Image (tube, rainbow, N blue to C red):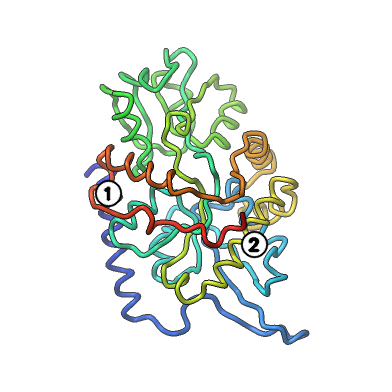
Amino acid sequence: MSQLRRTLATLVALLAAVTLAACGGSDDEGASTSASATTGVETEKVSLLMNWFAQAEQGGYWQAQAAQTGAADGLEIEVRQGGPQIQTIPQVAAGEADFGIAQADELMLARAQGVPVVEVFGGMDKYLQCLMFHPDAGISDYADISGHQVAVAPSGGFWPWIKGEYDVTDVKEINFTGSLAEFKRNHDLVQQCFITSEPYFAEQEGIDHETLMVADAGYNPYSQGLFTSEQMIKEHPETVRKVVAAVQEGWRQFIEDPTKARELVMEVNPDAEQEPFDFAWQTLKDGGYLGDPIGGMTAERWEELHTQLTDAGVLTKEVDPSTVWTDEFITQ
């Protein structure tokens, strides 16, 4: 089964799970509230589920918890670490978490399968995905990838779109594992990466490398965005507003000073190290990856993404792009 078919098959299964959860749901779903023992003031607790292990690329969300940026609004934020077995879209849609992190193209595909999720905060304004290759591979543009071996993960729309847009042919695709071992050995290999991660480790291992940013190719979905369920938006719009304001402030603080977020990430993820974390933070800061306003989105970007996924053959069911996102909660 192809990578994209596996992705769509997963979404169909997720929709069935969401439907069952909705049928058996209770009135207790959604953010919970409790009263402070000292002040008696009601505090609303919300959970944010990350899409991978705690890391700098999620820094603004961890900052929101570390600094409790929603406290003035009576909001207590709990950020939950993700991992290989975590699928944020079905878990949020089923009410197992209040909010989650995903890429915009993942949400578009989920929505096309009827999963009722909506992006409320755009996260990164520039897609972090890139393609890494050896300087002696003869690659200077995306079309030059033709004839090479390519390591890509079994999800997302960027690679099918690049192949079609730049007429990339005669490639041998292998599964992306996240390891640099094969890349170090094989100078024919082109490997997907995050600009905030793999280039750092390649540098540390003395591996000569160059990169092409996927966003520069013209495929630029919002990255590390915050989404929630339609039910949450309908039943708790004020909670959504508070959460968006809190994470927007969290990202602002994180870019200025990552200390609190880094301490929390190190505590939650024992495998996290300060130097790679700081490299990612510096890359985000210097590269201007956050938009203005932070987390802001436009209809034009979502419509373009819809067209690109359709043209690439990734999006095979019709979906109205306007149903996948809203900026009504963003502070401009």
Q: Compared with residue 40, is residue 213 higher up or lower down, i.e. above or below? A: above
Say which quarter of the image contains residue 154: top left
Rendering coords of residue 156 (x, y %) = 37, 43
Rendering coords of residue 102 (x, y %) = 46, 53
- Of labels 2 and 1, earlier in sequence is 1
* Along the line of sight, the residue nearer the viewer: 286 or 295: 295
Q: Compared with residue 70, is residue 292 higher up or lower down, i.e. above or below? A: above
Question: Which quadrant holds the N terminus?
Answer: top left
Q: In the image, what residue type sits under mark 2?
A: Ala
- Residue at the location (37% across, 46% down)? 303
Crowding around mark 2 (Cα neighbors within 10 Å: few <14, some 14 to 19, many 20+) is many
Q: Are marks 2 and 1 in contact (CB under 8 Å)?
A: no
* Along the line of sight, the residue nearer the viewer: 188 or 289: 289
| Res 6 label | 1
Question: Which quadrant holds the C terminus?
Answer: bottom right
Residue under label 2: 246
Q: In the image, what residue type sits under mark 1?
A: Arg
| Res 248 label | none
Rendering coords of residue 53 (x, y %) = 54, 52
Q: Compared with residue 283, is residue 118 higher up or lower down, i.e. above or below? A: below
* Along the line of sight, the residue nearer the viewer: 186 or 126: 126
- Residue at the location (35% across, 30% down)? 162
What SS does tag 2 mark?
helix
- Residue at the location (69% across, 53% down)? 261
| Marks 2 and 1, how far apart at CA | 35 Å
Say which quarter of the image contains residue 282: top right
* Along the line of sight, the residue nearer the viewer: 179 or 281: 281
What SS does tag 1 mark?
helix
